[in-house]
Amino acid sequence: MSSSDLTVSIENQEAFSDGVFQRNSTKDWDLSQFPEAEEIDLNSDNCTAIIKVAARSQHQHESYDLHRIANVSNRLAIRQIDPEIICFTILDHRLSQYPSARFGLSQNTKRGEHLSWLRLFEASEEASPKQDEITDVFKYLNGMISEKRLSDVDHLLFLLGNIRMSLELKAAILRFTYPKKDEFRAWNSAVDNIQDKIKSKGDNPKDLLFGLI
Amino acid sequence: MLVCHKSADVNCIQVVSLGIAETSEGQRHVGIIYRKDNQVRVCHLAWHCKLIDELASETAHFKFDWVRIAIPDAPLRAVVSFIELITGSNTGSEIPYSFLGQTQPFDRVTGKYNPSVHAGDGLTCATFILEIFKCLGLELLDESSFEERPDDLDWQNKITYWLRQRNVEGHHVAKLEESNLAKRFRPEEVAAASGEENLPLQFTEAASKGVALVEELHNCCPFTEDRARHR
């Protein structure tokens, strides 16, 4: 299935049009236009968007009701991570409660919080992780890669800049995935993103990202 | 650059340092000294199929001196966690000793040693460390810049002789005996590189810094026959 077979719709009480939510309308995205990711601002006071992902060829629809995250200002990332899987993720401080979901389009639709373990490591960017936390993150990544869930790891890297986690732990994730960086489309941009964040705090990125930049 | 164990307590190591010792005449050995759970441990490939991870206070036959490491603490904490994966995934008897090297000796995810694809493959104490650091984006030496050095042939012959004497599998030793002169990454070069900020070190720089480190080592902890008797 190619990306041109897929559309993503967001329906909302106040639906999205030209960057502004308007009532009772629908915005469709043809993902072939957004091979990497589409990020959408959902700046609605009462955001109860329903996301529909449709595989045109299969007439398959799946809806996600986002009412769980109502009344917050969110950004939504939609991304086709491989020919058969679309991920969407809410990019905000509540990520740990609703990290991501994905649509499997060639088989029964799957959903789930594949990155829900991230909530265990929620911390401010300035926090210094304990040694055991770094080891545990390595073990989670280890599990994902051992189970061949490379697309999930790639999605994690895609999200890395936005999740609430210490910068040192984020750098450790980049470091652990370094040997497979060519297999992750989001690895380089994740490095750039973390580097920018470190710089914006006035720190030298060469400390945390030593050897990676 | 070198900190002597006689003048400083190994417990002053905060995250990771590379330890070096002269274990027999002209034979250096390198290992990773690291802090875990407020204890200082040593992880090193001691010999053929002998990966050791133990408290620094328990190293029996020799004491490591160590190089003041120039790599920042945060990446070193990742090294500690990766060592934990490796020591947790291996029993200690998987890694053959070999100067022929091995492509991707560790499963970069599980830390598990990948059984050798070719007879004679394996690691030395120095390449064991290079591989661990490399897995995490920390390249100590520019391996492609290294050249074969004729004086390493004597060392290769010494190693194969020792392996034969200790009844290591015949096919493994035979492969080493048949091999030509190989590129060698010397323990002192790996240890010296860890003290440098601009990595990876090129061959010529690594070689000269290695020589300087050995001089320092001989000044503070020269090899003595006493130590040999304790082996």
Image: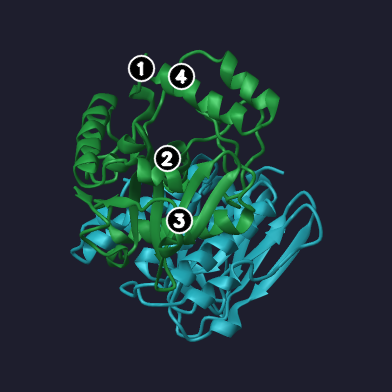
Chain colours: A cyan, B green
* Contact flag, marks 3 and 1 (Cβ < 8 Å): no
Would you place residue A112 above or below residue A152 in this image?
A: below
User: Residue at (57%, 46%) from the top-left corner?
Assistant: B50
The mark found on residue A189 in the picture is: none
Which amino acid lies under the numbered mark 4 shown in the image of this protein? Answer: Ala
Decide which of tag 4 and tag 3 comes sooner along the chain: 3
Instruction: State left or right for residue B63 relative to residue A54.
Output: left
In-front residue for pair B177/A65: B177
Decide which of tag 2 and tag 3 comes sooner along the chain: 3
Q: Residues within 10 Å of mark 4 (few under 14, many from 20)?
A: some
Decide which of tag 4 and tag 1 comes sooner along the chain: 1
Residue B153: name its quadrant.
top left
Question: SS at mark 2?
Answer: helix
Which amino acid lies under the numbered mark 2 shown in the image of this protein? Answer: Leu
- What chain is tagged by disc 3? B
- What chain is tagged by disc 4? B
In-front residue for pair B134/B157: B157
